[in-house]
Image (spheres, grey):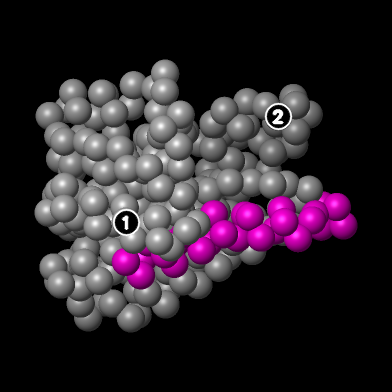
Amino acid sequence: MTALITGSARGIGAAIALRLAKDGFDIAFNDVSEKSFEDNDIVDRVRALGVQAEVFIADVSKFEQCEDMTKAVKERFGTIDVLVNNAGITRDTLMVKMTPDMYDLVIAVNQKSVFNMMKLVCEIMRKQKHGHIINLASVTGLYGNPGQVNYAASKAAIIGMTKTVAKEYGSRGITCNAVAPGFIHTPMTDQLTEEQKQRMLSQIAMKRYGEPEEIASVVSFLASEDSSYVTGQVIEISGGLSM
């Protein structure tokens, strides 16, 4: 069994790679640059679990690079059983200050990449007659967030795409679901001011940030046969942010 995870050098993507490796999946890592894996032991940690792991460099916002990567992963591992669309960026500012380039870049990396990868991998899964796709959405795509009109648009689009692909490919043995993380403890949240952190925490019922491993555990379920009758769903992982 093979899992291909985009944007998996660090953060939530790396946590997902490690958890799926523990579940017995060979791991196809992806990131946009080799530098993402420098001074980073995630590939070695995965291999230490007794599974195979390889790095595939590609800018997933570019269809041709996704095509080359998907072909290489299939040739290397023989199958692609799980696709996790995790790659994403932010370019945050209020809309009045947001440039068209800032908007277009976030849409390309966050949302167009999901189209690219699903289009290519669904064809492999269709021939295999099985597969699980998990897309990383966000609570921002559900509820909006000031300063993130580009990010919110990309993540809301992913939710619609997830439900559509679930309907198109359900009869082919392919499930397609999304997870919508809330405020997760990552290097990005470490850069927030104490005032920003407290304002965010005040909105969360559990009064703490989530951990990348808590996202990975839900992805693990959606990548397993335990979720064989679950498709087209968006699972919010936010510690009660929306309540």
Q: Is residue 13 visible?
A: no
In the image, is 17 to the left or to the right of 88?
A: left
In the image, is 167 to the left or to the right of 203?
A: left
- Tell me the kind of residue under disc 2: Leu
* Residue 28 screen position, x and y as percent: 27, 43
Q: Nearer the viewer, residue 145 or 50?
A: 50
Q: Nearer the viewer, residue 179 or 128?
A: 128
* Residue 79 screen position, x and y as percent: 15, 56
- Name the residue rendered at 28%, 69% in the picture: 122
109 is within the stretch colored magenta = yes
Q: Which residue lies under the disc numbered 2?
A: 192
- The image shows residue 30, relative to residue 243, as above or below, that is above
Instruction: Quadrant for residue 133, please give it.
Output: bottom left
Q: Which residues are magenta?
A: 94-120
Mark 1, secondary structure of its residue: helix
Q: Which residue lies under the disc numbered 1?
A: 68
- Name the residue rendered at 12%, 54% in the picture: 78
- Tell me the kind of residue under disc 1: Asp
In the image, is 152 to the left or to the right of 193?
A: left
- Name the residue rendered at 60%, 60% in the picture: 107
Q: Which comes sooner in the sequence, label 2 or label 1? A: 1
- The image shows residue 52, relative to residue 240, as above or below, that is above
- The image shows residue 202, relative to residue 5, as above or below, that is above
